[in-house]
Image: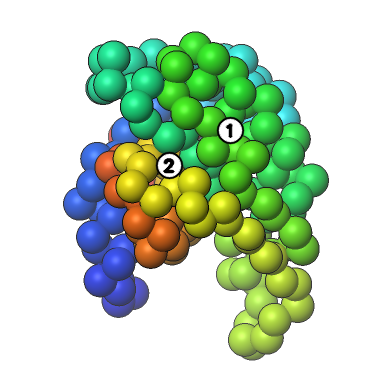
Amino acid sequence: MAKVDEITKRFWNKLIVAYVKYYPKRIKNVGLEGEIARSLVYSFKSGESQEIVAQETAKRLKETFGEKVEELVFTCIPASSAEKNEARYKAFSERVCELTGAINAYDHIKVSGERLAVHENRKVSEKKITKVQVIEFDEDFFKGKNCICFDDVLTSGKSWAAFGHKLEEFGANVIAGFFLSKTTYKVA
């Protein structure tokens, strides 16, 4: 069993909202609901289905926080490259904030370079850096703000914990993680 660091454990104890179960492609016979969820995740990752996911995110934010949502900063955990990040999150963040009144953090985080996606890392047998991603934060923007993080897939929680911890180092308070999907490996 993999050892979980203290920061990741701390983030698993925060509020986590995941909309659908995501079955990795290697899991077969996931049923119609599993196939629909998988298709939605792939569609969102490619920059499609933004409106559907924005509507669902806005609904869940309002249900969870009520009018207080307007005091929260909505921030997306960056995708693996600047291009993917813009395609996936720019219009999506704008729409979620338009629907909820939340504060949009998209323009306060800049992505350059490219990191390996999680599924790519599993294929690398030796440890070496082949791609590098740089994320620049407008640190002053996040100071003293209550933040909601969003990502498309929650698996181990490491990306969310690392990103959220960085925001907290700037003085933000990460109060929750909202996710389009949560990875599961067992079909019910």
Quarter of the rendering containing residue 71: top left
Return the residue nearer the eye: 74 or 32. 74
* Vertical position of residue 36 compared to residue 157: above or below: above
Disc 2 secondary structure class: strand
* Res 164 seen here: no
* Badge 2 density bin: few <14, some 14–19, many ≥20, Cα 10 Å: many
Whole-percent x, y for residue 167 in the image: 42, 56
Question: In whole angstroms, how far apart are the C-alphas of marks 1 and 2?
Answer: 17 Å
For the point 66% across and 77% down, the residue is 124
Quarter of the rendering containing residue 35: top right
Whole-percent x, y for residue 31 in the image: 47, 26
* Res 83 seen here: yes
Name the residue that disc number 2 marks: 149
Q: Give the position of the N terminus as an image quadrant.
A: bottom left
For the point 34% across and 22% down, the residue is 69
> Label 1 sits on what residue type?
Val
Circle on res. 83: none
Residue lying farthest to the left in this orientation = 13
Disc 1 secondary structure class: helix
